[in-house]
Amino acid sequence: MIRPINFTGIKNAGYASVNTYTENGEKSRTILNMQLTDDKNGKDLSEYKMILNNYPSLMNDINDEFVNVEFESENQGPYLIMQAKINGNPIPVHNKFLPLLNFAKKLVNKVANFKPKDFKYDPDHYLMKEAQEGLIYNENIVDYLDGTSGELKLLKGSGLTEKFDRYFNDENVEISDAELDKVNEAADNMVAVLHDPAYVHNGATYLDALMSIYTSPRGKYLS
């Protein structure tokens, strides 16, 4: 059973939406990454640690106070394959895993209902490993800025993916140290945007809707 929503207990939230392309088709990934805390209004971190006692494989390898909730859908010809993930681990729609799905859905719903004052961030969090490698779980965010691993939807149609690819990956491009510093700063600024409260709020609202579909009776026939 999902506990009542409170507006504390989560900080350093980030959101990303990416596309990857496989031999089977296009895969869409919608991701919310967040750090859990305990306070007088809720014990999200303690609840999370209790879950990890029963499911140690769900431990977050980047930081054990963070939870990464992802919804992945893949078009395979006439079929749409969907799955939810916690810290990179697929969680099937099954009675056995309902406590995990309810916990993940509760966290996403909480962020979706945040007001601007509810978003809390540590200084320069976007520069930390938890943001650079933890937002798209256990992957370097730069690989999605330059298109190496997939396409960051935020950059679609902007031309920035191609520019990042040129500066980071084209061996024929000569770039000075000062110019490289500017490119790296631009990449860090993009990660900061992925942690902007307004962007995260809108993304969490979308992810909340996807999770609701996934956990509904109809969702069992889509996964």
Image: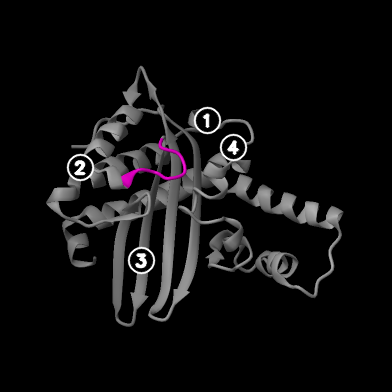
Q: Are marks 2 and 1 in contact (CB under 8 Å)?
A: no
Q: Mark 2 is on which residue type? A: Pro
**Tag nearer the camera, 4 or 1:** 4
Q: Is 148 situated above or below 154?
A: below
In the picture, the quarter occupied by the C terminus is bottom left
Q: Alpha carbon of mark 4 to alpha carbon of mark 2: how far? A: 30 Å
Q: First in sequence: mark 4 or mark 1?
A: 1
Estimate the spatial distance between the alpha carbons at disc 2 and disc 1, rounded to whole Å: 27 Å
Earlier in the chain: of badge 2 and badge 1, it is 2
Residue type at mark 1 is: Lys
Name the residue that disc number 3 marks: 73
**Local SS, label 2:** helix
Q: Position of residue 176 (x, y in %)?
A: 86, 59
Position in image of residue 24 (x %, y %): 38, 80
Compared with residue 143, is residue 43 higher up or lower down, i.e. above or below?
Answer: above
Mark closer to the chain start, 4 or 2: 2
Q: Give residue 161's position: percent from left, percent from top.
A: 65, 66
Q: Which residue is mark 4?
A: 125
Q: Earlier in the sequence, mark 3 or mark 4?
A: 3
CB-based contact (under 8 Å), mark 1 and mark 3:
no
Residue denoted by label 2: 99
Q: CA distance from mark 3 to mark 4?
A: 29 Å
Mark closer to the observer (3, 2): 2
Picture disc at residue 120: 1
Task: Inspect the image, locate mark 4, and give the three-letter code of the amino acid beneath it.
Answer: His
Contact, mark 4 vs mark 1 (Cβ under 8 Å): no
